[in-house]
Image (cartoon, rainbow, N blue to C red):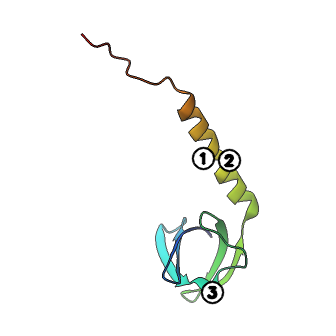
């Protein structure tokens, strides 16, 4: 399954699990070494617990590039209103 590391608050990491559209809260110390907010993780759930978790570097880079491309597209749009004032 895929999950995104949404945020870290008070020593807890909040994962948003894509396949089941569920929020999962774990201790920050259980994250893979080098995890950052916004990273995509491949997780395996066994008996209601996360049994394995790794950072998906390729998916993380792909999602960041998509977001950057979208922001660039938005910034290129003409500024101001298309309606004229009277």
- Element type where label 2 sits in the image: helix
Question: In this rendering, would 52 be left or right of 21?
Answer: right
Label 2 crowd (10 A; few <14 / some 14-19 / many >=20): few
Q: Position of residue 58 (x, y in %)?
A: 75, 58
Question: In this rendering, would 85 be left or right of 49?
Answer: left
Which disc number belongs to residue 65?
A: 2
Q: Quadrant of residue 84?
A: top left
> How far, Cα to Cα, is label 3 from label 2?
28 Å
Tell which circle, 3 or 2, labels the residue nearer the N-terminal end.
3
- Element type where label 1 sits in the image: helix
**Residue that label 3 marks:** 29
Residue drawn at x 58%, y 83% is 28
Residue drawn at x 53%, y 34% is 74
Which disc number belongs to residue 10?
A: none
Q: Position of residue 82 (x, y in %)?
A: 38, 18
Label 1 crowd (10 A; few <14 / some 14-19 / many >=20): few
Tell which circle, 3 or 1, labels the residue nearer the N-terminal end.
3
| The N terminus, quarter of image | bottom right
Q: Give the answer, above or below, for where 59 lies relative to 86.
A: below
Q: Give the answer, above or below, for where 3 lies relative to 64.
A: below
Q: Position of residue 47 (x, y in %)?
A: 57, 89
Label 1 close to label 2 by CB (< 8 Å): yes
> How far, Cα to Cα, is label 3 from label 1?
28 Å
Residue drawn at x 55%, y 33% is 75
Residue drawn at x 75%, y 63% is 57
Q: Residue furthest left?
A: 86
| The C terminus, quarter of image | top left
Which disc number belongs to residue 67?
A: 1
- Element type where label 3 sits in the image: helix
């Amino acid at each position: 399954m895929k999950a995104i590391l949404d945020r870290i608050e008070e020593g807890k990491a909040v994962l948003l699990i894509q396949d089941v559209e569920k929020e999962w809260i774990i201790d920050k110390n259980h994250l893979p070494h080098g995890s950052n907010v916004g990273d995509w993780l491949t997780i395996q759930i066994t008996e209601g617990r996360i049994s394995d978790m790794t950072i998906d570097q390729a998916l993380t880079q792909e999602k960041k590039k998509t977001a950057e491309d979208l922001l660039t597209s938005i910034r290129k749009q003409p500024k101001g209103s298309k309606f004229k004032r009277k």
